[in-house]
Image (cartoon, rainbow, N blue to C red):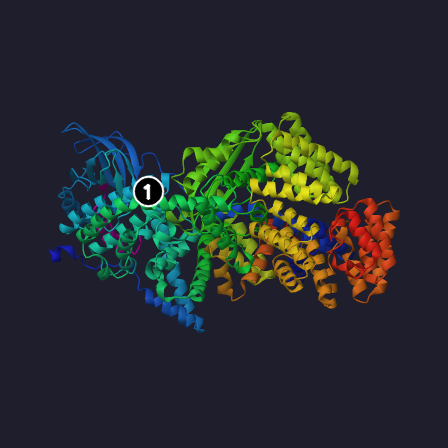
Amino acid sequence: MRSPTDQRRWEEIQSSFDELVELDPDARAQRLAILAGTDPDLRRAVEELLAADAKASVSLAPLDTVFRLDTPAPIDPLGLSGRTISHFELRERLGAGGMGVVYRAEDLQLGRPVALKFLLPQYNFDDVAKARFLREAHSAAALDHPNLCTIHEVGTSEDGWLFLAMPLYPGETLRARLARVGFLPIHETLEITRQIAEGLQAAHAAGIVHRDLKPANVMLLPDDTVRVLDFGLAKARDQSLTESGVMVGTVSYMAPEQIMGGKVDHRADLWALGVVLYEMLIGHPPFAGEQDITIAHGILHDEPALPSTRRAEVTATVEDLVLTLLRKDPARRYATAADMLRDLARTGTVEVSARHAMRGRLRRAKRIVTSRSGRMVAAGAALLLLGAGAYGLFRSLPAIAGAPALATATASVAVLPFTNVGGDSTNLPFSDGMADELTTALGKVEGLMVSGRTSAFNLSRKGLEPREIGRLLRARYVVEGRVTTSKDRRRIGVDLLDIASGREVWSGNFEYDALNRYSFTVQDSITRSIVRQLFPHLSRAAIASSAKHATENPAAHDLYLQGRYFFEKKDSTSFAKAQDYFRRAIRSDSLYAPAYAGLADTYSQQATYGFAPLASNFSKSKEYASRALALDSTLAEVHVALGFIALFYEWDWPTAGRQFETALRQNERSAGAHLFHAWYFMAVDSMSAAITEGRRAVDLEPFSPLMNTRLVGFLMYGGRNAEALEQGRNTFERDSSFSTLRQELARVYVQLGRCPEALAVLQSSSDQHVAALGGIRGYTYAKCGRRAQAQAELERFRVQAREGRYVSAYVLAVIYAGLGDTDQAMAELEKAYVEHTWAMYMIRVEPAFAALHSDPRFIALVRKVGLVT
Amino acid sequence: MLEALSVPAEVAIASAPSDVAGLLKRWSAGDERARDEVISLVYDSLRQLAHRKLHGAPAEKSLNTTGLVHEAYLRLVDAARVDLPDRAHFLALASEVMRNLLVDRARARVAEKRGGGMIPLGLDEAMWIADENLDSVTDLDEALTRLEALSPRQGQLLQHRYFGGLSLEESAAAMDVSLATAKRELRSARAWLALELKGEPIQ
């Protein structure tokens, strides 16, 4: 029987856990195996803890709702339906708000339909309070104005219910409108503002303050009339509740003096009008946050972000008007609604003449975005120049803390991997794939900046909160979702979060038959909904273009997603599985170009990773890539596949360069295409271009360990070791688990003559791939005076070769070069040439071979590979 | 006319906010009595708020610990005059009070069901926790007590999270540790808790 853990033991377990939880699965398994030898109990505990950690967010989720008592609103909470109260016969409940329940009713005296609002029991206070309420309500009822809700009658039922009788207005509330469309056109915004202000002016003149003006209290009628509801009710409510000290109402619309419990007059309504106006313009209130306290703090202390920075159409006059309404000190706001209306009238006339100019400016801005993302097709020369200028500006923006400088003028969104609820790993390709597809589809929308898929996925897998991810990726919006698969149904929930306000802008739930494994309908409606939220004015056609599918066969697509999923894993069994899935996808739809491209990539990379013989794999790769090309020559991935073959196998640099350029024309935002383009520049000895492309790849995928590591390499090959070191260290600080990064960093240290650091950084690295980089450990030993250990590395590789495992001669050449054994190094390089090792095109820039450069055998070899000197 | 436009001053937040801000300052200066005073204010405030919530409008009828704790903060503290460490200390304290309130009520309900009720509960106090969640509350409490024995700080971290809804930043500030430490310790604590609640505690 094992003993329960005590403090010391828990510390031990925890420290192993902390270390292992950061590692990738292979490294974890290695460390666990070592632990098993020394302390099997510790290993078991850590392993259990790791497994629990992987599922913690799901298994602990119920705790977040344990204390929540969400009772669904009853259909007829007061039980009044069907009863006759006073001279009203009550029908069904229409809705409920913070203060009361509204029923449809029939006025039996006048024979007309009305809305009856009953105050909820807690507002049926004592007699004094009741009298106060009735007084307020009566004075509100006395108001007769086209922009105020008419109150027919204020009454008390036989059993003491307080109620108001109002006309039954058709239409929707401003809250509902905003929830539907996000924000409103400028002219509509100003017209609604005008009508609210007219209503306020009338009420204020009668000495009545609303105190709770908010979009839910503004009714938009079908004839474009606006009516403000619930005038005067808030005061009676607040007075009664103040005694118990409960704060009611929505903080977002409260004026600073209301929050501080100070003197509240009609100018609090003007503040609220400012908030409502702001929200109509921008889509959210000026002060936002997850908690009331955050919002309240913002209202008291922060200045609102200028509306014009969020929406270019907002003119200076409109902006001044909003900011005057939103002054913290009531004395500095407009003195009356009438004053504000005078300014508004001026704005209106300015607005009409300015609108056309504005529209022109907008359109131009849009084109710039288009050209930057490489999707512009036709435009005048002047516009082209403008576009080029904008691109240059974009590129030169300083990147803070390694994050990319994404443009802020357009909407930016990051799509997180969907949670696979239930954790059944067979659904992973689908939940990941759904997010993948959304990333791609949204990427086709003009003006929408979509964060790199790898970065979003990596950050999410590290357990970062959506808000943090949005901030790191500089994305204004984050899309997250959940997939639940049961026996026969598949449910997908998606949320669109606004990082700035912390609000959920949109959320949708979809459910369909799980036998149909993929659903394009669901994918398209998610894409469409998101695009509509972000660009309410985008045309239907533009939205539709984001929904072009390479296959209409859901089964084929599902198989394709499985293939992509395994391809990304890049180990020998996964490559085989990926091939199988791509093949099955092709069997389902023999004209499915991306599946052919996937198959082509799988074959070529399987070979470059050393898991399969080069010649046969590359010839298959070429065959599938050509078929993909014949099916669809507009796919970036097809050109990347062809470029890959030309670069790594055919050593045909001009073709490789052309293919990558074509791919980038199809999709400028493909980080992978930029990466390979950079490799190509190494072959043609243009290291500064390689570095530029490497940087662009990092811009697009700032949190991809691979892209960041490759940039370290490009900088080092380019002889920019100080920059390489900085890039390497920054990447290492963020994520030290990527083994290739350790090797690249070690090489940089060796170049800089900093042996202790080079050796330290290699300490826990494992040789994952047998390709060129595998010899770095031996090379480092050799260059750092540990010749015996370098020899031991050589011996280790020889043993591996004798066991029948593939050991690239290139790896041995690197170690021999490190040991200064020029002859052996040359001999191994010759062998590598005969083997046709993909890394041969790097020999000229490889620092390990610098000492060989003057050797005639090396010069001849460089010529044979076809590298231009 | 002017007279008609001016409305008498009313107070939206009842209790004198400056008091609590002052108490927090005194407490952070080492005055433990100030802490006890804050606790009793928070206790009353949370009970009142929960009561209001449960009798409130349908739309507001949801009792969640995070909301209550933050609302208590809003009521009791003058937000403008309190900085992050004080706010964090307040919220941390409130999470402790919240835990006591909930766990006491859960225990009393469980005892009541077994026919041996000791603390008589008002109707609304019985509504605090849904029947099906009673065990979750007591299980969580017991697990946290065990974790506190192993690592007091990790116990607190989880208490902050589940009973007070503190953000990681607030939790770190309340315990005066770095954000990185709080993050690291929360991760293993959560994994530990998951095993514990599954009934497969780590040995």
Which residue reaches farthest left? B1
Residue A868 lies, in percent from the top left, at 73, 51
Residue A771 in view in this figure: yes
Q: Chain of mark 1?
A: A
Q: Which residue is mark 1?
A: A184
Q: Which residues are magenta?
A: A227-248
Quadrant occupied by the C terminus of chain B? bottom right
Residue B37, above or below A667: below
Depth check: A591 or A281 in front? A591
Depth check: A591 or A294 in front? A591
**Numbered disc total:** 1
The residue lying at 42 percent from left, 33 percent from top is A540
Element at label 1: loop
Quadrant occupied by the N terminus of chain B? bottom left
Give the residue type that dot 1 points to: Leu
Residue A563 lies, in percent from the top left, at 65, 36
